[in-house]
Amino acid sequence: MPDAPILSVSEACVRFGGVDALVEVDFTIETGTVTALIGPNGAGKTTLLGAVTGMVPMHRGRVVLAGRDVTAMAPHARALAGVVRTFQNLEVFANMTVLENVMTGRHALVRYGIFDGILRTPRFRAGERACREAALDRLDFVGLADKKDLLAGELPYGSQRLLEMARAVAAEPKLLLLDEPAAGLNTRETQALAALIARVRDELGITVGLVEHDMDLVMGISDAVTVLSFGAVLASGTPRRIQENPDVVAAYLGD
Ligand SMILES: Nc1ncnc2c1ncn2[C@@H]1O[C@H](COP(=O)(O)OP(=O)(O)OP(=O)(O)O)[C@@H](O)[C@H]1O
Ligand SMILES: [Mg+2]
């Protein structure tokens, strides 16, 4: 029997002023998949990621993560429950080192109080050591281990994108949501990113939700695709079925 879905959004509605950004959206991500969310500009893809992580309030609807209803939970609680996202606009901390950037992702998991930090208790020091080792491991995973002591702002753009991924997986999410991770990457970098996303799923066992405009990337690595248009779901299915769907073709070509 297949696992229950890692994510199940039902009847999500989001309104910004007079604009209906999401209208009765149902969206499911099966455990262990890469599931893409595609659609024209302004379709509501980023808004849906925000509704899942709790950063965008829904006026109706339900979000169930790994079998748990998280609809009423704040963003940090949802992160602890297992969902982490990256942003459409690159957000690394330019003045921190590469390693420190990844450690900030890890700190979401660490359980010691401010007094442990001030007093540098054995628990604090052991925690920091473990945090550093895990961060190094994630840097190695994305191929940036030898850049660990550089300032993040000194990395080329493509490497900053990889750093963002390392930071996100350092939080050990069950579900990782990526908002246009290939934006601004060249063809070679995009191919490397595709391989890395597949390894996140296969080697780390993290389910991936992927918002992306690069259709070669989407169709090449996704197990399932959902199409949004004007805030509503237009179609869901395998990459092949989606590519053959006349409604989807029309939405993209502006028929
Ligand atoms: N904070 C906001 N305030 C007002 N309107 C917003 C806000 N965020 C998004 N919108 C509107 O909601 C709709 C959906 O936007 P959203 O950013 O989710 O689209 P998208 O599918 O991610 O587009 P893109 O592919 O360009 O990133 C758009 O009409 C947008 O203008
Ligand atoms: Mg967007």
Image (spheres, helix red, strand yellow):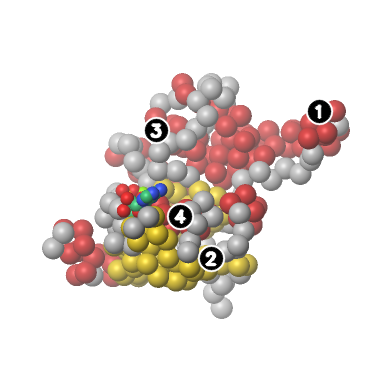
Between 119 and 102, the one nearer to me in the picture: 119
Pick whichever, 222 or 23, lies toward us. Answer: 23
Label drawn at residue 63: 2
Q: With 77 as the anchor, is 253 left or right in this view? A: left
Where does the N terminus fall, quadrant-wise? bottom right
Q: Ligand 2 within 8 A of label 4's CB? A: yes
Label for residue 33? none
Mark 3 residue element: helix
Q: Amino acid at mark 3?
A: Gly
Q: Where does label 1 land, which residue?
A: 118
Which residue has dot 4 on it? 49
Q: Which residue is denoted by mark 3 in the rendering?
A: 158
Q: Residues within 10 Å of mark 4 (few under 14, many from 20)?
A: many
Is 248 on the left-hand or right-hand side of 171? left
Question: Disc 4 residue type?
Answer: Leu
Residues at marks 3 and 4, CA–CA distance in whole angstroms: 23 Å
Disc 2 to disc 3, C-alpha distance:
33 Å
